[in-house]
């Protein structure tokens, strides 16, 4: 056997690495599930804790706020103190915060617990992806492992309402939080045995002033997007967006001046890294916006309960999982850019058909085709981002990929929601005795109809249904056009990349230097952190 062949064999992951991946994937599934598992529990905890409207919103939103705000900080921290160490700390804290949330005796306590879950979840996510990147050195194995990671993350959010509904059939609302405790215990036990300790060699100290600067940019940005999704006319949302821009500029200027920044913007010099990051962001914008409208269609038009709507949505979620697992396999023979582009064209056709169908079965078939076609964006996009970043920046690169996904979904909900609302308001023909709020959304129209005489109520609901379907059609058409454009861009921007593993042992892009980093194998003591 030649030296090159021996090195290739040595670089291939074995049983320990795949077992470690299973543990990390299960934890990722639980983290994604925590985003949506509360949907069905809200009425139950509302009866027990009696939160006000503002408190209820914070209970739902603070988890996502904290994850989006702390991903970059935690990714950089893991690069410095060790990704396995941060993963273990995060798992212990996440389990403790889950227990605190399950037994919260008031709204404030639950909000604090949800905030802690978001911060500790942000510690887990980039650490898990960075460890997968370093555990799987073989390009094909790494792509397959990241496909599993992506499938669990994508599937977890869709399974949240289904699992939450099943638990609430027999247990109290706090049981939805306790689901993660045994998984975190397994992670704490197995991490030292299965996962290596990796950190950036010679990394400097964490730049503490950069942390509040990033939070001051990220948190108002997420808040603004969520507020604009609810009502595009809210002036404070634009104020929050302006604050985010100002602090974002200050943050970028500081990072460019630092020798060892919190967020290394030099990663964007890699054509593969920046192109994959942009494609991932655009894909999540489209996916987030469409998911919002499909969920509203099932509940507001078809009148399904959240649990039944969740079961319907589980079908396209399974297609997304299947596509995430298959994409790396297909990309072994075809160029990644070709695989992504080839998936986006039928996805555009599927969404276009779905949003103009007017029939639930046809709609769900179209959405399923669309989600299947969009799966390569997540699986291959994250793999390209991770594979083109230097190992000592694996945590930061992972955090950038995940932050891109979080912001993409939030922006998609806001932008597509605003577009659909504008069409709804322009199309609806409300009776003269209907309040002005009936023109704002189908939910407001349904509320207004309850106060009207039967004839006016029926006319308002019929018009609101037609207006919502018109908005859904426009959103689907715009999404389809964007997907076709994204397909062309993907094929062009990623045209130079060979199939995964075609050049065994080489990085995804020669322009990126991949220096060594400190690695401690499972069972050995990690060196002291710098």
Image (spheres, helix red, strand yellow):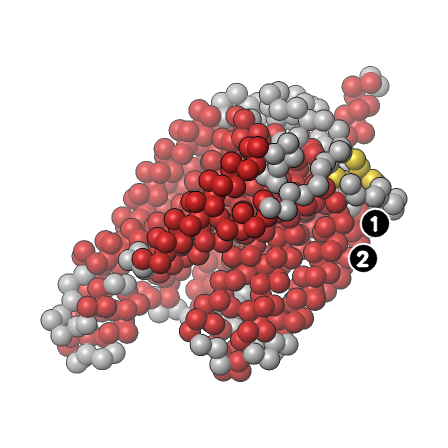
Front-most of 207 and 353?
Answer: 207
Kindly identify the residue that appears in the image at 23 percent across and 57 percent down: 424
Regarding residue 510, the answer to whether it shows in the image is: yes
Residue 226: % across, % down: 41, 57
Residue 130: % across, % down: 67, 41
Q: Which residue is label 1 attached to?
A: 193
Residue 391: quadrant of the picture = top right
Q: Which residue is label 2 attached to?
A: 189
Is the residue 123 above or below the residue 50 in the image?
A: above
Residue 507: % across, % down: 65, 25
Front-most of 348 and 229?
Answer: 229
> Is 83 left or right of 482, judged from the image as shown?
right
Q: Determine the secondary structure under disc 1.
A: helix
Kindly identify the residue that appears in the image at 54 percent across and 26 percent down: 269
Kindly identify the residue that appears in the image at 62 percent across and 71 percent down: 101
Image marks 2 and 1: residues in contact by CB distance under 8 Å: yes
Say few, some or many: other residues with alpha carbon within 10 Å of mark 2 (under 14 / 14 to 19 / 20 or more). Answer: few
């Amino acid at each position: 056997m030649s030296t090159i062949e021996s090195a290739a064999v040595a670089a291939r992951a074995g049983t320990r690495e795949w077992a470690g991946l299973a543990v990390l994937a299960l934890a990722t599934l639980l983290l994604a599930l925590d985003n949506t598992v509360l949907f069905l529990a809200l009425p139950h905890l509302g009866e027990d804790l009696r939160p006000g409207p503002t408190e209820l919103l914070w209970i739902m939103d603070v988890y996502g706020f904290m994850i989006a705000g702390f991903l970059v900080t935690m990714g950089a921290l893991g690069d410095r103190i060790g990704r396995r160490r941060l993963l273990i700390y995060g798992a212990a804290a996440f389990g403790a915060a889950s227990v605190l949330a399950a037994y919260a005796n008031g709204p404030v306590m639950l909000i604090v617990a949800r905030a802690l879950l978001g911060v500790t979840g942000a510690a887990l996510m980039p650490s898990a992806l960075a460890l997968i990147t370093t555990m799987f050195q073989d390009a094909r194995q790494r792509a397959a492992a990241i496909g599993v990671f992506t499938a669990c993350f994508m599937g977890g959010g869709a399974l949240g309402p289904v699992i939450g509904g099943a638990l609430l059939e027999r247990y109290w609302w706090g049981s939805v939080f306790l689901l993660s405790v045994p998984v975190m215990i397994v992670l704490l036990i197995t991490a030292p045995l299965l996962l290596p300790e990796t950190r950036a060699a010679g990394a400097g100290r964490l730049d503490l002033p950069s942390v509040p600067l990033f939070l001051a940019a990220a948190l108002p940005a997420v808040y603004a997007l969520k507020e604009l999704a609810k009502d595009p006319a809210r002036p404070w949302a634009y104020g929050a967006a302006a604050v985010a821009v100002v602090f974002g500029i200050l943050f970028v200027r500081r990072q460019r001046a630092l020798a060892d920044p919190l967020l290394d913007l030099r990663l964007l010099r890699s054509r593969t890294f920046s192109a994959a990051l942009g494609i991932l962001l655009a894909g999540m914008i489209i996916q987030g916006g469409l998911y919002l409208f499909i969920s509203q269609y099932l509940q507001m038009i078809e009148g399904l309960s959240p649990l039944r709507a969740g079961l319907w949505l589980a079908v396209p979620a399974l297609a997304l999982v299947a596509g995430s697992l298959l994409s790396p396999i297909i990309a072994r023979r075809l160029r990644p850019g070709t695989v992504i582009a080839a998936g986006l064209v039928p996805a555009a056709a599927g969404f276009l058909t779905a949003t103009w169908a007017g029939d639930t079965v046809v709609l769900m078939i179209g959405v399923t085709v669309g989600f299947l076609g969009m799966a390569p964006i997540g699986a291959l996009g994250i793999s390209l981002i991770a594979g083109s970043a230097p190992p000592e920046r694996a945590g930061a690169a992972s955090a950038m990929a995940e932050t891109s996904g979080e912001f993409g979904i939030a922006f998609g909900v806001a932008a597509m929601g605003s577009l659909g609302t504008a069409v709804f308001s322009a199309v609806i023909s409300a009776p003269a005795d209907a309040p002005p709020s009936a023109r704002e959304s189908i939910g407001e129209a349904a509320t207004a109809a309850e106060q009207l005489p039967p004839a006016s109520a029926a006319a308002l609901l019929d018009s609101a249904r037609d207006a919502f379907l018109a908005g859904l059609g426009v959103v689907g058409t715009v999404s389809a056009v964007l997907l076709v454009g994204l397909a062309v861009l993907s094929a062009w921007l990623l045209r130079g990349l060979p199939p995964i593993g075609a050049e065994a042992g080489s990085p995804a892009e020669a322009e990126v230097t991949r220096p060594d980093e400190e690695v401690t194998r499972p069972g050995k003591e990690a060196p002291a952190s710098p």
